[in-house]
Amino acid sequence: MHHARPTRWQAVAATPEFRSLLRSRRRFVIPATVFFIAYYLALPVTVGWLPRVMSRPVLGPLTLAYCFALSQFAMAWILLAVYLRRSLGFDVRAARIRRRETAELTDAER
C-alpha cells in the first residue's frame, strides 16, 4: 500500500479530474440533504401551523399527518437508492484517480 505525502496529496487535490469529482458529488449531496431536511421538517411545521388540514381523515382513522409521516419512510429509502446509484459513479471516478496516482507513485520508486 502506498501513502501519498501531504505535498503529493495537495497535487492530486488540485487536479481537474479530482476537483470535477468533488464538484459533481457536492452538486448531488447538498441538494439531496436540503431536500431531506425540508421534507423531514415539513411534518412538524404543517402539523403546528395547519392542524385542521393535517388532521383531515384520508382513509378511515388514517389522517393526512399519518400519511405524510409514513411517506417519510418511503422518501428516505428512495433517496438512499438514488444516492447508492449515483455513488457508484463517484466510486468509479475515485478509483480511476487512485489507480493513476498509485501507478505514478510506483513508477517514481523505480
Image: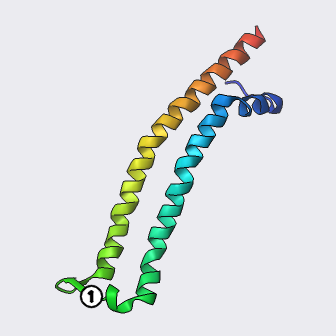
Q: Amino acid at mark 1?
A: Arg
* Residue shown at the point (66%, 36%) measured from the top left: 19
**Vertical order, 18 against 56 (above or below):** above
Q: Nearer the viewer, residue 57 or 103?
A: 57
**Vertical order, 16 against 50 (above or below):** above
Q: Residue beneath label 1, please?
A: 56
| Quadrant holding the N terminus | top right
Q: Nearer the viewer, residue 38 or 79?
A: 38
Residue 29 appears left or right of 60: right
Which residue is farthest bottom? Answer: 52
Residue 73, x across and y down, in percent:
36, 65
Q: Secondary structure at mark 1?
A: loop
Residue 72, x across and y down, in percent:
37, 68
Residue 85, x across and y down, in percent:
41, 42
* Residue shown at the point (37%, 62%) measured from the top left: 75
Residue 50, x across and y down, in percent:
40, 88
Residue 64 appears left or right of 60: right
**Vertical order, 37 against 109 (above or below):** below
* Residue shown at the point (40%, 61%) measured from the top left: 76
